[in-house]
Amino acid sequence: MTAGACSGLVFLLTDYRKAVMKRKVRIGIIGCGAIAQELHVPEYLQSGEAEIIALSDSKHSKAKELAKRYDLSAKTYADYKDMLKKEDLDAVSVCLPNFLHCAATCDALKAGCHVLVEKPMAASMAEARKMIATADKHGKLLAVNQSQRLYPVHQKAKEVLDSGILGKILHVTAMFGHAGPEHWSPTGKWFFNKKQARFGAMADLGVHKADLIRFLTGKEVAEVNAFYECLEKKRSSVEDNFVSTLKFTDGTIGTLAASWTVKGMDANYTILHCANGSLRICLIPGRPLVANLINPECEIVFDTPEAPSNDALGWGLDTGGHFCRAIKGLEPLFCSGVEGMKSLEIILAAEEAAKTRRTVKLSRK
Ligand SMILES: NC(=O)c1ccc[n+]([C@@H]2O[C@H](COP(=O)([O-])OP(=O)(O)OC[C@H]3O[C@@H](n4cnc5c(N)ncnc54)[C@H](O)[C@@H]3O)[C@@H](O)[C@H]2O)c1
């Protein structure tokens, strides 16, 4: 190829890249409850990367209310299958109760859409595998909204751990708790129904920390022990408290806990004890990320924002932006289906361990 032809090709590729970057991703929303209202829609809008084309909810009034709240000209549907049939969409967010994730995700993938599905990605490993296989078969992206990966404080913590200043990670502890989903989604009765939610606090909150631990340490869990109880939410058929102990494949140990009975102040922290000191993430109010080293002996307080508040309009995570840029091939997925499945496997193993009062080994199949 001549030098002239070569520079022409470079120009063409640059123009193509610019055109790709500018093009908005055409989004549909399946399920217009709390997470669609507070995170998906505002974060797609704030990203500037997406156009919300259609909204669907089996309670049609919820789709209409969501369109009104954000002044969207999007079409609204009561049946998401109609939306998938009639609209020309690039991608959808699946924001449904847990037991509906697999069917809606597979329907959307088959209809030619990339999917961002809420956590926990599925209610069983078989469902998770089906979703991944469907995405592969149809050549579409499957992302799981394990949103804690995107907290700026967790991104910074990962950078600190990867830098090696703390040395080998030896012990991890992570806890996520609040007063219960009734405060987050007053209409979301399904959270307390085992058939629809599959789990209680562990599916709602524990899976976030299971995923975060894997993300931060880069390690995989090998064995799990656990206890769970329903202490206060007596009308529910799921647990409101869960605690588990973890052993990683390299011998590192840890604890993972989730609760819906935490009062006064939410608990949303992770602590890593390492060979050269400790890293405390969101443990100390006003000091979201603190490292205490032994060599050289010092305390480092990192300048990063606190964990995002659920009350904020959009959580400042750029979730929609990350997903859209992955669709355009500009960055990798922040959490793929396979990653989401590995995190799901930890809480499923913890449930089995709690039920059988035995140590459960993860299969890794
Ligand atoms: N990433 C996070 O931090 C985070 C936070 C909260 C919830 N979530 C997850 O988001 C998902 C939804 O939770 P939520 O709090 O928005 O619940 P929600 O109950 O507020 O919303 C669910 C919506 O789905 C609708 N729906 C139910 N069945 C439907 C169907 N067959 N077709 C279409 N719509 C249907 C309901 O009418 C409701 O509007 C859950 O999987 C939950 O675990 C994630």
Image: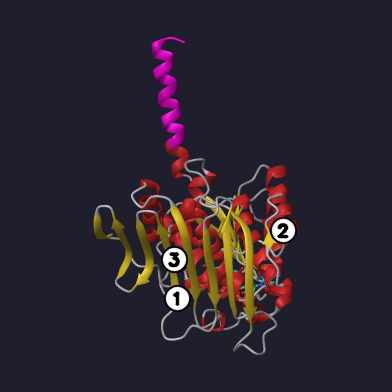
Q: Which residue is mark 3?
A: 270
Residue situated in front as seen by the camera: 126 or 6: 126
| Residue 178 falls left or right of residue 275 | right
Q: Amino acid at mark 3?
A: Thr
Indicate left or right for 52 with 342 as reference.
Answer: left
Residue 193 image offset from top left, x and y in percent: 69, 79
Which three-letter amino acid code belongs to the residue tagged 1? Ala
Q: Is residue 4 magenta?
A: yes
CA distance for labels 2 and 1: 28 Å
Residue 165 at x, y percent in the picture? 33, 49
Image quadrant of ligand 1 equals bottom right
Q: Secondary structure at mark 3?
A: strand
Which residue is identified by label 1?
A: 267
Q: Residues within 10 Å of mark 1 (few under 14, many from 20)?
A: some
Q: On the rendered structure, is 331 left or right of 133?
A: left
Magenta residues, start to end: 1-17
Direction top: furthest residue: 2
**10 in relation to 333, above or below:** above
Q: Position of residue 187 (x, y in %)?
A: 60, 82
Dominant secondary-structure state across the stretch colored magenta? helix
Residue indicated by mark 2: 125
Q: Badge 2: how crowded within 10 Å, few (<14), some, or many (20+)?
A: some
